[in-house]
Image (spheres, rainbow, N blue to C red):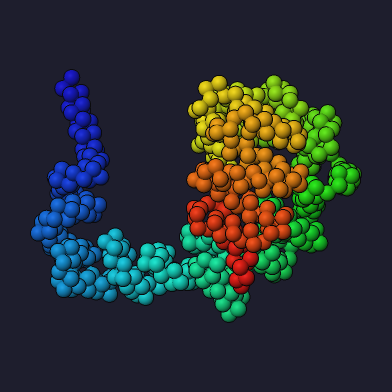
Amino acid sequence: MRNALILFVCCFSLQIYAQEPQLASQYFRNGEYEKAASLYKTLFEKNPYNANYLNALIDCYQQLEKFEEVTQIVVKQLKSYPNQEYLYVELGYNEQLQNFPDKAAPYYEKALQSIDKSPALGYVVAKTFQDNFLLDYALLAYKKAMALNPNADYNFQIALIYSEQGEIENMFNTYLDLIETNENYESVAKSYIGRFITEDAESEPNILLRKLLLKRSQNNPKNSWNELLSWLFIQQKEYDKALIQEKALHKRNVGNLNGILNLGKITFENNDFEATKNCFNYVLENSQNLETELLAKLYLLEVNMKTNAPVETVEIQFQQLFKQYGKNVATLSIQSIYAEFLAFKKNESEQAISVLKEALKLPVNEFQKGYLKTKLADILVFENKFSSALIYYTQVQNDLKNQPVGQTARFKIAQTSYFKGDFEWAQSQLSVLKNSTSQLIANDALALNLLITDNAVKDSLKIALKKYAVADLLSYQNKNQQAIDTLQFVLNQYKGHPIEDEALFKQAQLFEKINQFTNAENNYLQIISLNKEDILADDAHYYLAELYLNKLNRPEKAKEYYQKMIFDYPSSIYVVDARKKFRKLRGDEVN
């Protein structure tokens, strides 16, 4: 019994001791510096080697303006442990906080001199400077440590300091020097550089990086510079320029088409179909691999579908692919896209369903099965067979719950429920998807959830929203005129309702699909006149500018609305593209 009691007391004491650092940290975060200092003082006295406790205690005292206490504990620590010379930085900073820069400088010099005696101290001295925002001294310390120890590499730390100082050119050059030393640093450097790069090719960081890379490419040609230039052009959506770099890389490394394949996929996802064709035609000209060849042909076929090539032409292409490669597991993607083509382009849904059911009989894995079932359910929704569609979606969602295809199926369940007017069930599914690992699914879920929520506030029976959902379904089914007429009913019956701007925007998009561009223009103008602060107002400005530029041949009006985008909606996702097109219309020289 006595031993058990001793054991209990020991365990309880250990638990209390383990909680002390957490409690001290909590006090510090809450601004209760006296309480935090009391705990950190006790912890430091018990653990004089623990630099974290000492640093935290110094921070507490400085927050309380107890500068003399800081001096005392640091001087005492240096006497006990003379090798901890990085603490001279703390002494100097303590003087600087009291507005005594002349007293601070000698301490900083002592800390720097300690690196001469022991280069191994270089990192901790530099980091202490950096933690106290003494960035110029931190740079000196890192550079001195590297000069004295050839094996030391603090370029990442140096680049980070340059970024904090706003020395963008020095920062870029430091990262590029790292890559020049070791190409394995490229992906990490790219992630840091990417924080300063935007879609706007005319932004200062973009221009600067391009110049630095071109200069290095001329002086010392190597793959990394082409790869980074390609990456930069992709960020700027200048895909033809990116392709030039990828071709140069391919010529140096014949046989590796991965860069061009990836670029082709990116251009397709961004609807730059001319660039997509350029990429995959180059792949076909240079590929020796059947799988790569098949992929390229598939993308080119999809481009034809997206750009409304004649149905007969596309059908012939599909049959040629099946004749050449057969209907097997290797051509599942082709079979799936063929089914979509049959249903959505040829209006042959029964044949499309048959194609997918035959594909499901092949020896497919669970992910392939989920993909095919999702496509099958999509076509069933197209045919208004909601119950059957929901069965397939639910099977996929249950079988692949935490996988992207499973999350896509859950979104489709919500979307189908929305089409049916079952908004509560739709929102219950959408609430789960807001934390989806796929940003695209999460964004789609958020958009649909907002649509339902925003338009249910003034309409408890959701009558207007149900009618809008019917129009949305008709649009999904390519019944464009019926969808337009349904939306017109909504606009006539529910003027002033929150659904009005959504209906106008949806109808405008459909007018564009059937080439009624003047009607689309009128709708966008109505959205803008309703409320310039509305969530769809920036979309309306951008699409109206695009309409004037590309369909109505009114470049001056396009320029006017691009300019409004730039000044009135600076945080819009369209503003970079609007600025680029405005400059071009104004006659600026755009590189």
Residue 316 x, y percent position in the rendering:
89, 45
Quadrant housing residue 244:
bottom right
Q: Give the answer, above or below, for where 10 lies relative to 197.
A: above
Residue that appears at 46% across and 72% down: 169
**Left or right of 474, for residue 571:** left
Residue 432 x, y percent position in the rendering:
52, 31
Near-viewer residue (115 or 424): 424
Residue that appears at 53% across and 25% down: 459
Q: Give the answer, above or below, for where 313 lies relative to 371.
A: below
**Left or right of 332, for residue 367:** left
Residue 79 x, y percent position in the rendering:
13, 63
Residue that appears at 18% across and 19% down: 1
The residue lying furthest to the bottom in this view is 219
Q: How many marks?
A: 0
Residue that appears at 72% across and 59% down: 553
Q: Would residue 169 be seen by someone viewing this image from the given angle? A: yes
Where is the C terminus found, in terms of image quarters?
A: bottom right
Q: Would residue 82 be seen by someone viewing this image from the given angle? A: no
Residue 518 x, y percent position in the rendering:
71, 48
Near-viewer residue (5 or 303): 303
Near-viewer residue (531 or 38): 531
Q: Give the answer, above or below, for where 421 lies relative to 511.
A: above
Near-viewer residue (420 or 187): 420
Quadrant housing residue 461:
top right
Q: Give the answer, above or below, for where 387 lies relative to 200.
A: above
